[in-house]
């Protein structure tokens, strides 16, 4: 095999809603900002995307994907996560080291540090979780444990992986052939399980590969997405036209992995104030107040409406039903809640009523 480049390849697969492109833009900018921590080192960034426009200000190679190609990559079952493995397999045909990273990530350290955890015989993933047998009631255990055990492919001790990062040396590209084959074979038995892709990666790597992880090097915000997306959108509003300017790079560390919550003393005060409300409404008020707090970090302040959205989603989940407009209005008009929200009450009310309509 003739390798086109010895530089490590950082790879993104991005298509669909603008939100995913926004995530990718910030992830790339954070990678390049942190790359400065390893002077003299270089990487190439490849973006496989249905829209090249969001990346026009970034030093990346964009491979424009049409719907037909993506459909082909997802066959035979239309499982769209299959394409992650197809893309990484293709890149490894031309490059020695490649790492595919999900868009909902940003870097704490230089991306070079991730590539230093990849070597022949080693798979880099985002994180190593528990063991396959930890939850015998899990859908993928009930569906596949017997067949995997009978073929000696996996047992209860197999570690489960998070594939928000997948990094390999080209000599191990066949691992992806195996994971793709397992996805195709087990998709119907697994009833198209959302996590089948990373599960099949774990099966393919079990006993044959050393596995490294990297949660200390990146933040993968698969949880609490609304809050982190709000931070990133605020950064893009400020720096989207010049994402690698000194000012933009200086702001990258302020879009941090910390959840924007008021200090402990303030939270205790909110908890006390909420006692004036019926029990089922107390957490709702506290989360609304989290969104009203005047955070010193401008990107945390940008999470206000995301906290309000989360408050509504959480209370409806706890109740097991959607609030009607009338019910929500009756909650928002309670004197204790109005007093607690103060001058922000009209903004909160308007936002939540619009959210309820969506």
Image: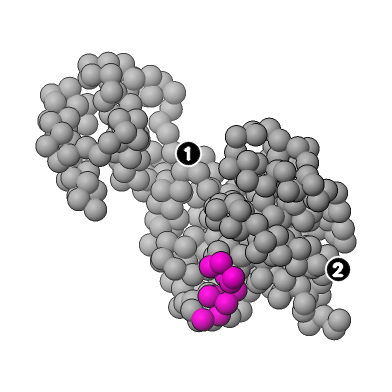
Q: Please indicate whether residue 75 sits to the left or right of residue 157 in the image.
A: left
Q: Is residue 158 visible?
A: yes
Relative height, residue 279 to residue 310 (above, below): above
Which quadrant of the figure contains the N terminus?
bottom right
Q: Residue at x 69, y 69 (%)?
A: 88
Image coordinates for residue 288, horizontal then vertical, percent: 29, 34
Q: Residue at x 55, y 80 (%)?
A: 69
Find residue 36 and report its image quarter. bottom right
Q: Does 106 lie within the magenta span?
A: no
Q: Please indicate whether residue 32 sits to the left or right of residue 321 in the image.
A: right
Q: Nearer the viewer, residue 330 or 251?
A: 330
Q: Please indicate whether residue 15 sits to the left or right of residue 89 in the image.
A: left
Q: Residues within 10 Å of mark 2 (few under 14, many from 20)?
A: some
Front of the two marks 1 and 2: 2
Q: Do the numbered discs 1 and 2 sit on residues whose CB atoms are within 8 Å? A: no
Q: Which residue is mark 1?
A: 259
Image coordinates for residue 156, horizontal then vertical, percent: 75, 37
């Amino acid at each position: 095999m003739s390798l086109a480049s010895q530089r490590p390849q950082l790879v993104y697969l991005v298509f669909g809603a603008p939100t995913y492109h926004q995530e990718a833009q910030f992830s790339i900018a954070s990678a390049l900002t942190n790359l400065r921590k390893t002077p003299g080192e270089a990487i190439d960034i490849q973006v496989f995307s249905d829209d090249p426009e969001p990346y026009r200000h970034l030093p990346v190679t964009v491979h424009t994907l049409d719907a037909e190609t993506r459909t082909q990559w997802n066959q035979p079952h239309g499982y769209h996560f299959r394409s992650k493995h197809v893309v990484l397999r293709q890149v490894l045909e031309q490059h020695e080291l490649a790492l595919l990273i999900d868009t909902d990530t940003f870097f704490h350290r230089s991306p070079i540090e991730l590539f230093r955890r990849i070597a022949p015989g080693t798979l880099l993933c985002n994180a190593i979780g528990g063991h396959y047998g930890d939850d015998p009631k899990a859908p993928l255990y009930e569906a596949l444990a017997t067949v995997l055990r009978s073929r000696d492919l996996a047992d209860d001790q197999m570690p489960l992986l998070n594939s928000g990062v997948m990094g390999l040396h080209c000599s191990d590209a066949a691992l992806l052939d195996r994971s793709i084959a397992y996805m195709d074979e087990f998709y119907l038995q697994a009833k198209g399980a959302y996590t089948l892709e990373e599960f099949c990666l774990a099966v393919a790597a079990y006993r044959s590969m050393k596995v490294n992880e990297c949660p200390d090097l990146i933040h993968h915000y698969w949880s609490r997405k609304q809050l982190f997306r709000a931070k990133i959108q605020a950064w893009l509003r400020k720096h989207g036209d010049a994402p690698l300017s000194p000012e933009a790079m200086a702001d990258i560390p302020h879009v941090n992995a910390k959840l924007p919550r008021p200090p402990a003393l303030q939270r205790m005060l909110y908890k006390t104030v909420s006692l004036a409300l019926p029990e089922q409404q107390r957490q709702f008020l506290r989360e609304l107040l989290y969104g009203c707090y005047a955070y010193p970090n401008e990107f945390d302040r940008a999470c206000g409406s995301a906290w309000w959205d989360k408050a509504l989603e959480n209370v409806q989940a706890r109740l097991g039903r959607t609030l009607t407009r009338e019910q929500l209005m009756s909650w928002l008009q309670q004197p204790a809640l109005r007093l607690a929200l103060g001058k922000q009450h009209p903004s909160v009310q308007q936002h939540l009523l619009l959210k309820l309509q969506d």
